[in-house]
Amino acid sequence: DSGVTQTPKHLITATGQRVTLRCSPRSGDLSVYWYQQSLDQGLQFLIQYYNGEERAKGNILERFSAQQFPDLHSELNLSSLELGDSALYFCASSVEPGQGANEQFFGPGTRLTVL
Amino acid sequence: EDKVVQSPLSLVVHEGDTVTLNCSYEVTNFRSLLWYKQEKKAPTFLFMLTSSGIEKKSGRLSSILDKKELFSILNITATQTGDSAVYLCAVEASGNTPLVFGKGTRLSVIA
């Protein structure tokens, strides 16, 4: 158990809908990262937050957005869902970016299925 | 653009075999290279290799980093069925940039 929690574990929804994925980082970790993992893709970085502020952005679609709250938990919002959005969504946390080599701890993931 | 390429994509071996997984990278301002093991769920951390630590070993697993040739290998000796997983390589650059992951090597160890 990495100490990173994600809810829900599974989510099944229809095209066009909107969902929210939630992540709580390890105690003491200030940085949260969101990744998407499809069947034939590696981990694709989406977005990073540090202490409530957006820090880095990857290949995140405009239909997707995220935020990190004062208690450091983070939410990833996916809207106007398409079949191709079906994937595993991972959250990871680390102590602080830019402070030397940075180990990230991954949550168990949310499996999103869009029908 | 930073890039990480892993090979092979998948590998099937018998218990007791030794395997070598490869990871090559192109990154500006390299800081570290990380190996993760992903079974059914979340990736779990194995090793981190930096300029100050280019060889790591833990039990039957070991890894080296060649900063000149820009690659790393992960060795697993005396493989067991429990080693079956996807092994991910990731590279971190300095300047607060996110990890860049390769697509992974799927290792299957059969009895």
Image (cartoon, grey):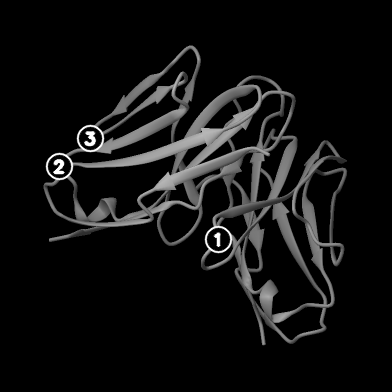
The percent position of residue B5, horizontal first and vertical second, equals: 49, 44
Q: Residue at x 82, y 84 (%)?
A: A16
Distance, label 1 to label 2, CA atoms, is 29 Å
In the rendered image of this protein, does residue A56 appear above or below residue B69? below
Q: Is A49 on the left-hand or right-hand side of B56?
A: right
Res A83 → quadrant: bottom right
Where does label 2 land, which residue?
Answer: B78
**Quadrant in the picture for the C terminus of chain B:** bottom left
Q: Nearer the viewer, residue B31 or A97?
A: B31
Q: Nearer the viewer, residue B65 or B87?
A: B65
Residues packed near mark 1 inside 10 Å, few (<14), some (14 to 19) or many (20 plus): few
Amino acid carrying label 3: it is Arg
Where does label 1 land, which residue?
Answer: A41
The verdict on a common chain for dots 1 and 2 is: no
Residue B60 tag number: 3
The verdict on a common chain for dots 3 and 1 is: no
Residue at the limit of the structure toward the top, as seen here: B52
The percent position of residue A100, horizontal first and vertical second, equals: 63, 19
